[in-house]
Image: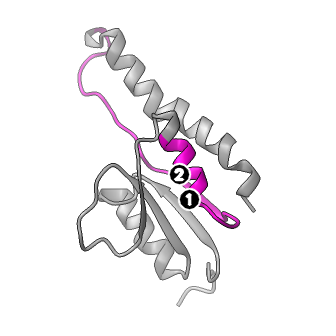
């Protein structure tokens, strides 16, 4: 058993309902954290709290921040995407989508959650 525990702590995981994000959410919960996952969709059997939203949308980020009612101890930026194919094939919209999800959203969400991070 790990001596590292998160009992009484709150963790937010973007993209936390599937794949790697789900595994991270489950492990944080196993360590005792209250897990809040941010996702655009979720399976009915998902065991953790969910805030529905798209981290690239300002109004959704505001709702995510407002869902954190106390201190936030762990923030995992797992939502992301990759575009398969050579860089020269990316049009402007593809590049903007990639940057919005992988760079801009984590920066803005971190900024907005900073007052709650402990």
Q: Position of residue 59 (x, y in %)?
A: 51, 38
Front in this rendered view, residue 13 or 90: 13
The label on residue 30 is: none
The answer for how far apart the CA atoms under marks 1 and 2 are is 5 Å
Residue at which label 2 appears: 64
Residue 2 is a magenta residue: no
Front in this rendered view, residue 80 or 57: 57
Figure coloring: one colour
Q: Is residue 50 left or right of residue 59?
A: left
Residue drawn at x 46%, y 41% as measured from the top left? 55
Residue drawn at x 67%, y 43% as measured from the top left? 112
**Tags 1 and 2 in contact by the CB under 8 Å rule?**
yes
Residue drawn at x 64%, y 65% as measured from the top left? 69
Residue drawn at x 32%, y 19% as measured from the top left? 94
**At numbered mark 1, what does the secondary structure look like: helix, strand or loop?**
helix
Q: Position of residue 70 (x, y in %)?
A: 68, 67
* Span highlighted in magenta in the image: 60-88
Up/down of 86 relative to 88, above or below: below
Up/down of 47 relative to 61, above or below: below
Up/down of 49 relative to 63, above or below: below
Dot 1 crowding, Cα within 10 Å, few <14, some 14–19, many 20+: few
Q: Position of residue 35 (x, y in %)?
A: 50, 70
**In the current view of this chain or complex, which residue is farthest to the bottom?**
1
Q: Is residue 39 left or right of residue 4?
A: left
Residue at which label 1 appears: 67
**At numbered mark 2, what does the secondary structure look like: helix, strand or loop?**
helix
Image quadrant holding the C terminus, namely bottom right
Front in this rendered view, residue 37 or 81: 37
């Amino acid at each position: 058993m790990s001596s590292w525990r998160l009992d009484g702590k709150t963790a937010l995981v973007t993209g936390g309902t599937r794949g790697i994000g789900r595994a991270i959410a489950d492990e944080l919960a196993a360590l005792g954290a209250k897990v809040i996952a941010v996702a655009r969709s979720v399976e009915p059997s998902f065991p953790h709290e969910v805030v529905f939203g798209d981290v690239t949308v300002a109004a959704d980020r505001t709702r995510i921040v407002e869902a954190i009612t106390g201190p936030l101890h762990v923030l995992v930026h797992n939502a992301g995407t990759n575009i398969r194919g050579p860089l020269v094939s990316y049009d402007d919209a593809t590049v903007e989508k990639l940057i919005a999800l992988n760079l801009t959203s984590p920066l803005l969400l971190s900024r907005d959650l900073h007052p709650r991070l402990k």
